[in-house]
Image (cartoon, rainbow, N blue to C red):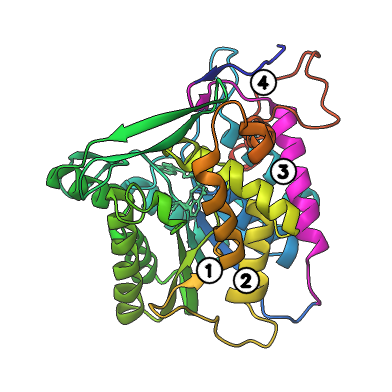
Amino acid sequence: MIVKPRIRGFVCITAHPEGCAAKVAQEIKVAKAASRDKGSPSPQRVLVIGASTGYGLSTRIAAAFGHEAATLGVFFERPSLKGKPASAGWYNSVAFEQAAHAEGLYAKSINGDAFSNEIKAQTIETLKADLGQVDLVVYSLASPRRTDPADGETYKSCLKPIEGTYTNRSLDTDKGEVTEVSIEPATQEEINHTIKVMGGEDWELWISALSEAGCLAEGAKTVAYSYIGPEITWPVYTNGTIGAAKKDVERAAGAIASRHDCQAYVAVNKAVVTQASSAIPVVPLYISILFKIMKLKGTHEDCIEQMVRLLNERLYCADGGAPELDDVGRIRIDDWEMDAAVQAEVAVLWPKINTENLREHSDFDSYQANFLNLFGFGLPGVDYDAETEVDLLLPSACQS
Ligand code: NAD
């Protein structure tokens, strides 16, 4: 079929298989270009939870193609159904596996709910059969809901302030209009539910399950991702419900390190365009401004550049040393975003921006292009007017 983008608010409900493959190929190229000499510290057997899009996918690519690591990926994606295109993460994973297998790298994937006991058990079964143990576990889930297997209850996360109503500029990314958004504060129940979904509990459950099954290599590392960002977004992010969940992820890192022979890190990453970040109020406008400033300074990065730097310069430093941490123990790969000069320029542009000058003061065109790229649209070399096969199987599913 011929696949065209169909955007509904902050999601695109179609995805282009060849376009997704082209985007994965671009990231593979970046990871390979940054690969280091054999014998440098590196991950060997990696489990990525949330491996199909955004930061998780890029970590998988950086580990496999920058370090020749064997990777097992867990994600929750929609395969093609009745001739309808699959989700972008499905096509990304098909393309990733094909490229990895072509280079003789181990790559398998498990599609299902990572919060469930069943998917944890299936992952452990696969590890025992194939890799034995993992030396790096990446936790990169972004989900709006979680069914806790302990009580069977489904919790929903929300993006709300905690201390009072938050009003600020936002962006209607579909129409390219700068708007104003006002968000009422969360109830205590909404805060608790967001912590249940996006906090550290499930990360701890994964590490305990892997450890009890003997699947964690001695001195293994694990990393979960967080975000801080500029003060303008703090009421709705860092000091809001999601920030409360991220504080719980930091608590979980300490708990994991104290209970297991495992180095547990929280890495604070840069703001990038992903399916998760496009749903956060205010953030797309901030990202559009940030892109313009960081591109002018030559420090712009996307997911893959961030994850290459995380692996090569922080988790697996060339000298084999421990990563540098901030005063509360986090890895800061958002250092270039949070650079004082960058943030000072954001603060100057923020009050000036409106619908009329959006393209002058920000790189909204790149934001929109990046957003379409997430779903495999707008990639060079792809013929979007041609028929394309949408019913693609995951190569590793065909093997089992
Ligand atoms: P994303 O939406 O691109 O990826 C989410 C991944 O989680 C996908 O692989 C998806 O399949 C998987 N997933 C969701 N629910 C699942 C479930 N129930 N079972 C199995 N897999 C499931 O998100 P992202 O932006 O890459 O976010 C990943 C992490 O990075 C999050 O912790 C996020 O807070 C953090 N982060 C994101 C940004 C940003 O700007 N996007 C910045 C800093 C940190």
* First in sequence: mark 4 vs mark 1: 1
Q: CA distance from mark 4 to mark 1?
A: 33 Å
Q: Amino acid at mark 4?
A: Val
* First in sequence: mark 4 vs mark 3: 3
* First in sequence: mark 3 vs mark 2: 3
Q: Amino acid at mark 3?
A: Val
* First in sequence: mark 3 vs mark 1: 3
* Residue of label 3: 24
Give the quadrant of residue 389: top right
Residue 153: give x, y in percent of width and height. 17, 40
Is residue 398 toward the left or the right of residue 214 in the image? right
Q: Amino acid at mark 2?
A: Pro
Q: CA distance from mark 3 to mark 2?
A: 20 Å
- Mark 3 residue element: helix
As for residue 384 lying within the magenta part, the answer is no
**Any mark on residue 390, and which?**
4
Label 1 Cα crowd, 10 Å radius (few <14 / some 14-19 / many 20+): many
Label 3 Cα crowd, 10 Å radius (few <14 / some 14-19 / many 20+): many
Q: Residue 337 or 396: which is nearer the viewer?
A: 337
Which segment is the magenta one?
A: 9-37
Residue 400 in view (yes/no): no
Seen at 65% across and 75% down, the residue is 313
* Residue of label 1: 136
Q: CA distance from mark 3 to mark 1?
A: 22 Å
Q: CA distance from mark 4 to mark 3?
A: 17 Å
